[in-house]
Image (cartoon, rainbow, N blue to C red):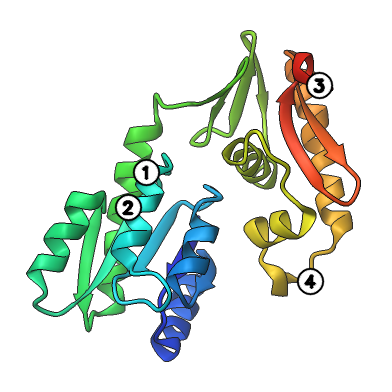
Amino acid sequence: MKVLLVEDERDLADAVANVLRKNYYAVDHAYDGEYGLDCALSGVYDFIVLDILLPKKNGLHVLKELRGAGIKTPVLMLTALGEVRDRVTGLDCGADDYLSKPFHIDELLARLRALSRRKSELLEDGVIMFGSLRFSPHTLMLTCDGKETGLTLKESQLLEVLIANKGRFISKDAIIEKLWSYDSGVYDSHVESQVSLLRRKLAAAGGALRIKSSRGVGYRLEEAASSE
């Protein structure tokens, strides 16, 4: 499970990230609302832990823009103790749950487990549509013209990033950030390898979808009929 933690209190954020990693979550961390929104818009995260009081962009504004962009990733809001108005506003804006500071890490883990169960139920019959492609993030299966093909976790994350950025190219650096994070030691060759593997899966599934590459620009998912 991949979690985006948007929290500007560095000591708290580092402590929470360490515990999440020990509990087998992959964690990316943003210290301000603008960068957090940019990361969240990729659509590759299973959960977002979002503080309300953030520099550059308030957490409630981040949430509104996420939901306005069609990103349905479950969001757990972090609020100051006793701020009922913020909790109500957050839930009205599309938050799935909230947790008041200070909190016990066991409660955070329990709330993420609850969101995971809820998310799984919502995705059992849910699919992502793009042209002739139907993709289920829950089962990691894609279907083109009735033919099913299974994906690895990284292939599925790459496909979700490409779909989330439909109509525009996404650079190798952006893909590395979304799938691995910059400090992971991953290079361009890793992206090229994953793109090659996903291309084979798309070809095996049939249909007209392909990954178009542009040197120095990046990759874009499109239907073959729309190629220039």
Cα distance between the residues tagged 2 and 1: 6 Å
Q: Which mark is residue 227?
A: 3
Q: Position of residue 166 (x, y in %)?
A: 63, 35
Query: Residue beneath label 2, please?
Result: 64
Whether tag 2 and tag 1 are in contact, CB under 8 A, the answer is yes
Q: Residue 23: in sight, yes or no?
A: no
Tag 2, which secondary structure? Answer: helix
N-term mark: 3 or 1? 1
Q: Amino acid at mark 3?
A: Ser
The total of numbered circles placed on residues is: 4
Q: Position of residue 82 (x, y in %)?
A: 8, 77
Q: Residues within 10 Å of mark 2 (few under 14, many from 20)?
A: some
Query: Residue beneath label 1, please?
Result: 68
Tag 1, which secondary structure? Answer: helix
Tag 3, which secondary structure? Answer: loop
Q: Amino acid at mark 2?
A: Lys
Q: Residues within 10 Å of mark 1 (few under 14, many from 20)?
A: few
| Up-down relation of residue 78 to residue 193 (above or below) | below
Q: Amino acid at mark 1?
A: Gly
Rendered residue at 70%/57% (across/down)? 174
Cα distance between the residues tagged 1 and 4: 34 Å
Query: Residue beneath label 4, please?
Result: 185
In front of the other: 109 or 127: 127
| Up-down relation of residue 111 to residue 11 (above or below) | above
In front of the other: 99 or 20: 99
Q: Position of residue 201 (x, y in %)?
A: 76, 28
Cα distance between the residues tagged 2 and 3: 34 Å
